[in-house]
Image: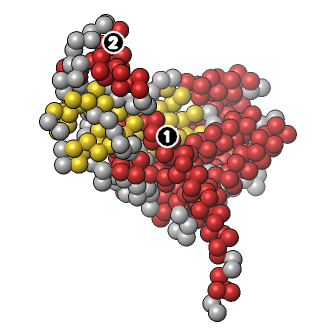
Amino acid sequence: MNWSLKIARVAGIGIYLHWTFLLLLGWLYFSADTRAAGLMIVGLVVAVFACVALHELGHALTARAYGVRTLHITLLPIGGIARLERIPQKPWQEFWVAVAGPAVNVVIAAILLAVIVVLVIAYGIHDIAGVRRVGGVLLFLGNLLLTNVALVVFNMLPAFPMDGGRVLRSLLATRLSRLQATRIAANVGQVMAALFIFVGLWTGQWMLVFIAMFVFMAGKAELQAVEVLAVFQDKHVRDAMTSGVLPVEADAPLEQVGEAVAAGYQHDFPVVKEGRFIGMLHHAAIAEAQQQHDVIRSAESLACRHCPILHPNDPLATAVQQLQASPCTTLPVLFEGQVVGLLTSRNIVAWAAVERARHEQKKGETRVLEAPQPNDAR
Ligand SMILES: [Zn+2]
C-alpha cells in the first residue's frame, strides 16, 4: 500500500491511514484559534475516523460471513474504503454488506446518546458548576453523536457506489437483472454526484466535490464491469472464437509461414503434426525469427507449447481470464485434438462490441413487439 501507513490489524484485516490524513490533522490543529480548540478538533476528527474505521469493519465482517475476504481498509480524508476482493453477486448479500456499515454508526450514536443522558442526569448542567464539570465532555460527545448521525444519512444517499447506492442496486436486483439494476443505480448516482458538485461549489465544501468525483468515476467503472460481465454471461468459447483457422505443418519452413502472414488476416498459427495440434506459432516469434533472417527454421521449432488450451464449450468468462493471465496473445481451441478455432483479445473485443449492439437492438425490438400483443389474441 503506497502512501499509507498501517495503524492496526483487526480480524486479519489491515487498517491503513493515508498520509494526507495526517496533513489534514496538522492543518486543523494549526488553524484553530487556541491550542485547546486545536486539540479539541483534532481529538474529534480522530474519534470520527475511529467511527469510520468501525463502519468499514461492519462492511468487512459482514462480507466475511458470506465468504468474501477484505483485502484492506484505508482511511482517507474523504472517508474510509473497505476493499473487498469482490462484490457479492446475490442481491440480499450485497444489501446486508452495504447496510452493515451505517448500522455500526447507528449503534455508536445510540451508545453516545445513552452516555450523554447518563452524564446529564448524574452531573446536571442546570448550574454553572455542572457545566464546568462536564460541559467540555458533553460538547465533544454531542459533536461525535451528530457526526455519526450525519455519516448514516450521507452514506445512505443513493449515490452508487456509496452504501445507499448499493442498497438501491441490490433492492432493484431482486426484481430486475443485475445489469438493469446497476444501470438505474449508476444513473441515480451520477445525478447525486452532480448535485454534490453543485452544493460543494456553492458552499465551498471541497470535500464534497472530491467525494462527488469519486462517486462519478467509481460508479461508471463498476457499471462498465457489470456490462462486460453481462455480455459474457452464458456464452461459450465457440461463440466468440474465430473459426476457419489456417494451420501450418510442423515441418513448414519459416518462409512459408511468412507468406501465409502476408496473404491473410491471421497473425498466429496453430502448428499441426499429422493433423494433431502440437503448439502455437505466435506472431511475435515469427517476426523475431524473420528479423534474424532465420528462414531455415521450421514452424515446430518456434512453436509455443505453454498456451492454455481451450474447449469450444468452455465458459467464455473463464477463457477471457485465462487469456488475460497468459503471456500468449492467442489461445487455441481444440476439439478431440483438432484445432477448431482461435481466441484472441482482439476478436473478443470485436465480438463484445457486436454482442452489446445486439443487446441494445433486442431491447428496442421487444419494446416494439410487446405493444401490439393484446390485439394478437383474436
Ligand atoms: Zn460504508
Q: Which quadrant would residue 194 be assigned to in this image?
A: top right
Which residue is outermost to the bottom?
Answer: 378
- Residue at the image position 29 percent from the left and 38 percent from the top: 332
Which residue in the structure is indicated by mark 1? Answer: 349
Task: Confirm whether residue 194 shows in the render.
Answer: yes
First of labels 1, 2 by sequence position: 2
Q: Which quadrant would residue 176 be assigned to in this image?
A: bottom right
From the image, which quarter does the N terminus lie in? top left
- Residue at the image position 76 percent from the left and 55 percent from the top: 126
141 or 171, which lies in front?
171
* Residue 253 location (% of width, % of height): 23, 19
Asked if residue 343 is positioned above or below residue 125 in the image, the reply reads above
Which residue in the structure is indicated by mark 2? Answer: 290
The reply, left or right, for residue 181 in relation to residue 56 is: right
The reply, left or right, for residue 223 in relation to residue 120 is: left
**CA gap, disc 1 and disc 2:** 29 Å
Asked if residue 128 is positioned above or below residue 306 in the image, the reply reads below
Circle 1 sits in a helix, a strand or a loop, which is it? helix
